[in-house]
Image (spheres, coloured by chain):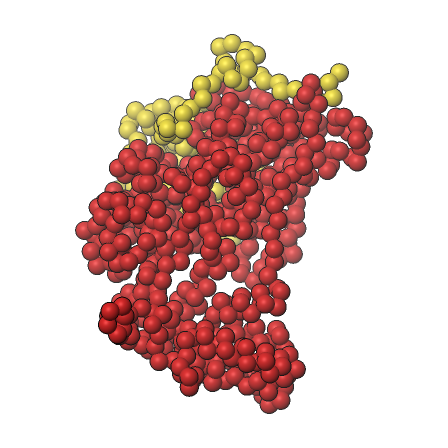
Chain colours: A yellow, B red
Amino acid sequence: MNRFAKFTITCYLAMGSGLALADQYALVSNDVQPLSNKVCATCHGANGQGNAVVGGPSLAGLEPWYVRNQLLSFRANYRGGQGSYIPAFEMQDSVAELSDSEIDELVAYISTWPALDTPATFTGDMSHGSELYASCAACHGIDAEGNAALNAPALATRDDWYMLRQLKLFKSGFRGGHPDDAIGAQMQAAVSVLETEQDMVDVVAYIKSMN
Amino acid sequence: MADRIHPTRSSNTKGKNRKVTRRELLTYLAATGSSATVLQASAALGLVPDTTVDIPQIPRVDPVNRPSVVVLGAGIAGLTAAYELDKAGYDCVILEAAPKAGGRCLTVRSGDVIDEVGNPQRCEFDDEDHLYFNAGPARLPSTHRNMLHYCKELGVELEIFINENKEAYVQDDAMLGGKPLKNKLFTTNARGFMAEIMAKNFEPKQLDVAFDDWEAESLIGAIRSFGDLSEDDLYKGSFRAGYLKGGYLEHGVQEDVVAFKELLKSSFMRSVLNANEGETGPVLFQPVGGMDKIVDGFVRQLNNKIYYSVAVTSVETTGDGVAVAYEHNGMKYMLQADYCFNCIPTHLMTGISNNFSPSYREAMAYVRRGEAYKSAFQTKTRFWEKDDIYGGISWTNQPIRQIWYPPHGMFKQKGIILSAYNFGGGMHFTKLSQEQRLETAIEQGEKIHPDYRQQVEKGITIAWHRMNHMLGCSARWQRNRSGMTAEEERLFNRIREPEGNRHYMIGDQVTLHSAWQESAVLSAHWAINDMVKRNSGGSSMPGRRIS
């Protein structure tokens, strides 16, 4: 019995299996530097699980129509074009030059990630949150299941830190403030029922509790 | 006037016959604005620390049962770890996210791509050996003995890097109406006036315990020499600032004295005089042909062990090793090794699946991303050489902060100048479009060199906060300038310790001195030494002690 574990290499999807690493890859010359086609993973994680530290929300499990809407919104500068919130700015720049077919590919790719639960990172006043949510339910559904016809995504599995930040951005006019952003304007109007930051915390905590 | 700018001293002189301690004297000298004086004085008093070379002594492993090591990230820290462990017989592989090695040790040449998220650029410099831009580290201090050790061992040829150049400029909108001033004029006048103040206030009687007459005479002599004072201890200008004209075949005419009040308007009084001391003091080196020649040196030794364009998706400790899942070309792989040395930036590691303990994750999530920004231009001519500038740095209080002139390629037609180096709070440029970044650099450079706009071509920018696979420059542990808090010390000590005994975070991000390659190297050495120490168990038996 070896006292040292040797490398064991498993190949999930490769045509063959049990191939050594060296057989799989041709070493890339230092002279060749193709642009990365995996920019998304840098912030959103290789499986779309997100990374709060760099401000990248989880994408796994998002409705494809919602992903498309947001990519189009960033490309059209509805989102990420104003203010100085760096992650939105990075996102806007990342998709600014995408073609329609590239957006199609991305939407399809992101939809292959299995849905993930995101943990709650804060709590709030649930009964107050429940009261506030009553008006949200009109679009997002009584169980926060979403409603594609109203462009309202499902909420309960999303990152709470991200939802809270978006509520603040809607409230401040940073999101939904572009004159051509009809969908965003709808939500911006809706957040008027949330008067304080504590209101936002409570309603997001309640949304997470429905998960 | 002296008292107004010497609050420390005026408060010290309340008791007329109070003795001045060594510490107070150093504080007093520091208050005059020149740490050069303090450094000279403190060196004489034996207070300057030393550095050591610290190459790990790794026991060679059993060649039949070689322990396996997976290194995540082919930056300087990862390359160092793999290089040393490979030499000792460990079975190493390196997984690198980018299509090339080096991480932030990045040199940009003709045709290279800067893979900035949302702002990819291809470098349009002419294809010549001397036309390169060190977009990351660009200086090797002579005291960074471990880096120099590897340069020597890997056959990386070095040349002198010029950091300080008194012929370069100091420009501050608050001083002289924004007119740039040659560094030699700034420095000579500042020192002259400071020396005059020190000489006027010099009272040997106050120093009667710490200094005898001879020492006191020696000190006042140093002060006079420091400022090139006249015999009556006044500063009346100095030829150290150069000649207005003449000096060789005809009598020289001195440059006009710049009013001290004018110099005091500039915050550079607090930085230019000591900008070239400590780690950026002479002697500094650079590799001939670009900083990434060091990367090339490591890669030559490790070439068949580095796998590029690999996206790590999961890192889990397994009790007796570490399991790493990754993707490459759309396929997923799993790899198990005895040890993992990980230099993935902590802020990205928090977004990669793992089974780390909460305290380890907490420490990772605490570290803030650095924001450094650099840009460069190729120039049509080496216009600075007509202004007696060969290498060195011009300083400005505009957001570009610095202009660097290349210390190599003298007299050639073209050159690459660094047109901005915003080392903290670089978000000013990060937020701008590529066109705005370049235009801003030109507008600000024009305040120092009037024909700047006509001279520059082919600009390139790098905002490390947005660089793909990194999203940050040097890690920052401190939330404020007053030093690390006890909480920060706790988090720092935690992240340096291995997770599950087998997983080490490395890189300058887990040192107290980030932004230097020496720190990256020392982080790898620290982790290797810790691994050896933990696993030898004091036994001289072959293999790793398992119980």
User: Where is residue A41 shown, x and y percent of the image?
Assistant: 45, 32
Quadrant of the image containing the C terminus of chain B: top right
Residue B263 in view here: no
Q: Residue at x 35, y 46 (%)?
A: B408
**Which is more toward the observer, B473 or B105?**
B105
Which of the 4 image quarters holds residue B188?
bottom left
Left or right: residue B535 compared with residue B6? right
User: Where is residue B306 shown, x and y percent of the image?
Assistant: 51, 26
Left or right: residue B454 compared with residue B2? left
Instruction: Name the residue at the top extreme.
Output: A16
Q: Residue at x 79, y 31 (%)?
A: B540
Instruction: Name the residue at the left extreme.
Output: B454
**Which is more toward the observer, B319 or A117?**
B319
Q: Residue at x 53, y 59 (%)?
A: B480
Instruction: Name the residue at the front extreme.
Output: B249
Instruction: Name the residue at the bottom extreme.
Output: B16
As displayed, is residue B140 above or below residue B178? above
**Which is more toward the observer, B217 or B105?**
B217
User: Where is residue A42 shown, x and y percent of the image?
Assistant: 45, 35
Residue B409 in view here: yes
As displayed, is residue B239 above or below residue A112? below
**Which is more toward the observer, B310 or B94?**
B94
As displayed, is residue B443 above or below residue A190? below
Quadrant of the image containing the N terminus of chain B: bottom left
Which of the 4 image quarters holds residue B105?
top left
Q: Residue at x 27, y 70 (%)?
A: B247
Left or right: residue B241 compared with residue B104? left
User: Where is residue B407 shown, x and y percent of the image?
Assistant: 36, 49
